[in-house]
Amino acid sequence: MVNDNIFKEVNDSYTLSEAVKEAQRCLNCKVPSCKKGCPISNDIPDWIAQLAKGNFGNAMHIINSRSNLPAVCGRVCGHERQCEGNCVLGKKGNRINIGKLERFVADFDSTAGLTHEAIPEKSRGRVAVIGSGPAGLTIAGDLARQGFAIEIFEMESEPGGVLMYGIPEYRLPKEVVRREIKKIENLGVIFHLNSTVGEEITIDQLFDQGFDAIFMGTGTGIPKRLEIPGGNNKAIRQAIRFLRRVSLYESGLIDRREVIVGDGDRVFVIGCGNTAIDAARTAIRMGSKEVSVVYHRTIDSMSALRSEYDEAVAEGVKFLWNTSIVKINAITDDKIDTIVLNIDGQEHEVDADHVVMAIGSAPAARIVSTTTGIEVDEKGYVLTRDNPYGMTTRKGVFAGGDVTNRPATVVHAMRDAKLVAEGIARYVDAIKLLATIECDN
């Protein structure tokens, strides 16, 4: 198994006294711009005020009213662009460290076992959730608290989706994800693991089992490719699959040789989002000699967080701006020799061992192809409507998250899922009411 120190979490938590002291700096603004900057409208000043007084349970209760994954959000949200980026104290360069405070409250609550939510009677309806990433977990948590019986169908052997397999341990420890999922399970949510909808079971069979509504939160599983000479070489790795292999290796489930990337390699990562930087920093940790991020624009255009970029640079990752890859020269069909880069209009041939693609992905057609009535756009993204929000062209089937091409981050997927949860609740309530009226008549 991998050395734990290599993937040790890079950012330390507050101590209790540090957290209270930081919380006491909050101005508790009457019109909190931090809340406006939060995609899920977290009541930030309210829970920070409780934290400042030492009322940790109250702070957690307020956070739970808006977020099912606070320990996750406190670590991986784009705070610098959202809540913290809108803090009025930021004008003086001294903004409240909201993400780190949220992380502290969630971790403290979990360690101390403060929160024990009552499980409501599951009498309002049955909902199947396909996928246990941020969107699926949010749907499950929100609806379970409202009295719905929720069952999650997950194709992997452990729930969490991208939280478990797509975000490196040094940013989001797996035990943190497991704790958050356990909280949702304690609401009465049932998990079916190693269960692939579209193969072992279909949407129609789920409805036959008595589910009133079904949510698709399956994400995007087909990586996009660059159409360049040599672009089909088997030595080209997909970032999300590389990160997943490393995650499995960390857990002792696969051998080091199956990770492939690392051990003195020269690695080029194509793209400059957070996933690209995650892949680059992970390649460094796996022993790569040289890792470069290749991006066709400038630093000001990258979608990655500036804090992630700064940490990557500190760890030795190089960044090639205004650069694109135009050709891959191979020794064999599974081994790269050199690549050709276009840098500011000039072509340069450089030695390379691996190319890691991080330019996005598209939805798999596994569910759509085995279900009638679910329409997709020309790129394969599921089409949904606004009323009820999130319902597909198939009655009773809803979708959200990356499979609909709306969210871009964990918290944006959560925001979209919360709206879909409201749509599901209204839909199920309506069909139950209609059924009651028909029976009365």
Image: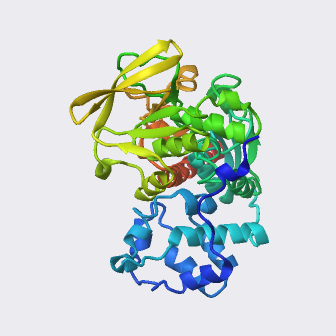
User: Residue at the top extreme?
Assistant: 332
Q: Is residue 2 visible?
A: yes
Describe the colour scheme in one phrase: rainbow
Q: Is residue 400 visible?
A: no
Left or right: residue 241 versus residue 297 is: right
Quadrant that contains the C terminus: top right
Left or right: residue 115 versus residue 138 is: right
Quadrant that contains the N terminus: top right
Above or below, 293 relative to 199: below
Q: How many marks?
A: 0
Q: Residue at x 75, y 54 (%)?
A: 182
Q: Residue at x 55, y 81 (%)?
A: 22
User: Residue at the left extreme?
Assistant: 345
Above or below, 197 relative to 167: above
Which of 437 and 329 lies nearest the eye of the viewer?
329
What x and y, as percent, mark residue 136? 60, 46
Which of 7 and 176 lies nearest the eye of the viewer?
7
Q: Residue at x 22, y 30 (%)?
A: 346
What x and y, as percent, mark residue 138? 60, 52
What x and y, as percent, mark residue 196? 67, 28
Which of 82 and 249 lies nearest the eye of the viewer?
249
What x and y, as percent, mark residue 362? 46, 30
Left or right: residue 40 versus residue 262 is: left
